[in-house]
Image (spheres, rainbow, N blue to C red):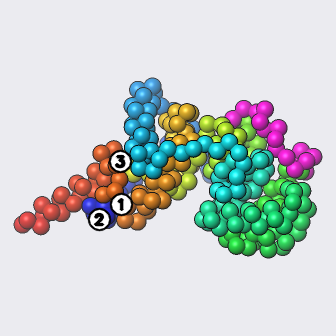
């Protein structure tokens, strides 16, 4: 049995729009791309949301089992812990706009062909493309990877970013986001899984689930979801909540036809409540 009614939540014109200062508006007019959107919440709202998040985490854990944090590097999943920061970034670049299976195959093929990151850096774009051809968007990603590794080496004299372990979270973000091809999601995943920093990464599944639960109302603005969720999710819950929201988005809270009848979060879910109200209205109208 699927959800009570298949419909998309309608947003008002004001929902999902960012409130900006005149300075920010001026930056947008000049074409400057802003990576992050600053948001603040009072303690009452933080406390309320902490309770909701803790309850939802327990419910999701009962559905899928609680995640196990990996302590050793692995190539099974592109987001999982890697030996070095640069390896993590390259692996995450391969994961963009494709499945975990495809990106993992591409990563394994890349490392089989090139034994070091410097070999990848000095290789031709064509040879990198050939190595990752099964991962999707190989032409674009091969250039992105080579440019990233070349830029790291040019800037720091070695193909390594391990010095970032001594930096603050904000300094890490500033450094990584300066590289083309490294966005907030790639940066956050690398920090969460490889560096063990409490950063809440937002992908399409996390974004969708957070909006449906009513924790955010950001429309298509994933960057704003990222900023809000990082402020609301307690640091000690970020790893487990991120993993479980992805599992939920993939297995139950699908983009089309979510399996609401199989979900334990319906009492917490704004999307389900709205669906139920619409169905009741339709049933009532059919009585006449």
The residue at the point 21 percent across, 60 percent down is 279
Q: Quadrant of the C terminus?
A: bottom left
As helix, strand or loop, the secondary structure at mark 3 comes to loop
Left or right of residue 181, residue 24 in this image = left
The answer to whether mark 1 and mark 2 are in CB contact below 8 A is: no
- Whether residue 90 is in magenta: the answer is no
Label 3 crowd bin: few (<14), some (14–19), many (20+), radius 10 Å: some
What element does badge 1 sit on? loop
**In the image, farthest residue toward the top:** 43
- Name the spot of residue 50 as percent of width and height, x first: 44, 33
Residue 21 in sight:
no
Circle nearer the N terminus (2, 3): 2
Residue 15, percent across and down? 41, 49
Q: Position of residue 202 (x, y in %)?
A: 56, 49
Disc 1 to disc 3, C-alpha distance: 11 Å
Whether residue 156 appears in magenta in the rendering, the answer is: yes
Residue at the disc numbered 3: 265
Residue under label 2: 1
Q: Which residues are magenta?
A: 154-169
Q: Are marks 1 and 3 in contact (CB under 8 Å)?
A: no
Label 1 Cα crowd, 10 Å radius (few <14 / some 14-19 / many 20+): some
Label 1 and label 2: CA atoms lie apart by: 7 Å
Residue 56, given in percent of the width and then of the height, sits at 40, 42
Q: Which corner quadrant holds the N terminus?
A: bottom left
Q: Nearer the viewer, residue 263 or 211?
A: 263
Q: Residue at x 67, y 64 (%)?
A: 103
From what the image shows, is residue 115 above or below residue 230? below
The residue at the point 62 percent across, 50 percent down is 185
Give whichever of 76, 228 is nearer the camera: 76
Judging by the rendered image, the residue that carries numbered circle 1 is: 259
């Amino acid at each position: 049995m699927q959800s009570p009614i298949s419909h998309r939540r309608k947003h008002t014109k004001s929902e999902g729009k960012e409130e900006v200062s005149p300075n920010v508006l001026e930056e947008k007019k000049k074409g400057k791309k802003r990576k992050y959107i600053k948001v603040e919440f009072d303690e009452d709202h933080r406390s309320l949301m902490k309770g909701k998040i803790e309850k939802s985490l327990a419910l999701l854990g009962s559905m899928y089992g609680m995640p196990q944090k990996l302590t050793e590097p692995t190539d099974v999943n592109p987001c999982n812990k890697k030996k070095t920061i640069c390896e993590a970034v390259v692996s995450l670049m391969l994961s963009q706009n494709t499945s975990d299976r495809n990106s993992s195959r591409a990563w394994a093929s890349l490392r089989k062909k090139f034994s070091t990151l410097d070999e990848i850096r000095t290789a031709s774009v064509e040879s990198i493309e050939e190595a990752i051809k099964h991962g999707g968007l190989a032409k674009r990603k091969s250039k992105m990877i080579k440019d990233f590794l070349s830029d790291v080496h040019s800037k720091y004299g070695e193909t390594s970013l391990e010095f970032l372990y001594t930096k603050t979270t904000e300094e890490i973000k500033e450094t990584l986001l300066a590289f083309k091809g490294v966005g907030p999601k790639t940066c956050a995943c690398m920090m969460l899984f490889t560096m063990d920093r409490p950063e809440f990464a937002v992908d399409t599944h996390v974004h969708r689930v957070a909006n449906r639960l009513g924790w955010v109302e950001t429309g298509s603005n994933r960057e704003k979801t990222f900023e809000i969720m990082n402020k609301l999710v307690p640091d000690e819950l970020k790893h487990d909540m991120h993993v479980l929201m992805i599992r939920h988005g993939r297995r139950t809270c699908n983009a089309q036809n979510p399996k609401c009848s199989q979900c334990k979060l319906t009492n917490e879910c704004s999307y389900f409540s709205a669906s139920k109200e619409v169905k009741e209205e339709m049933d009532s109208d059919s009585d006449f």
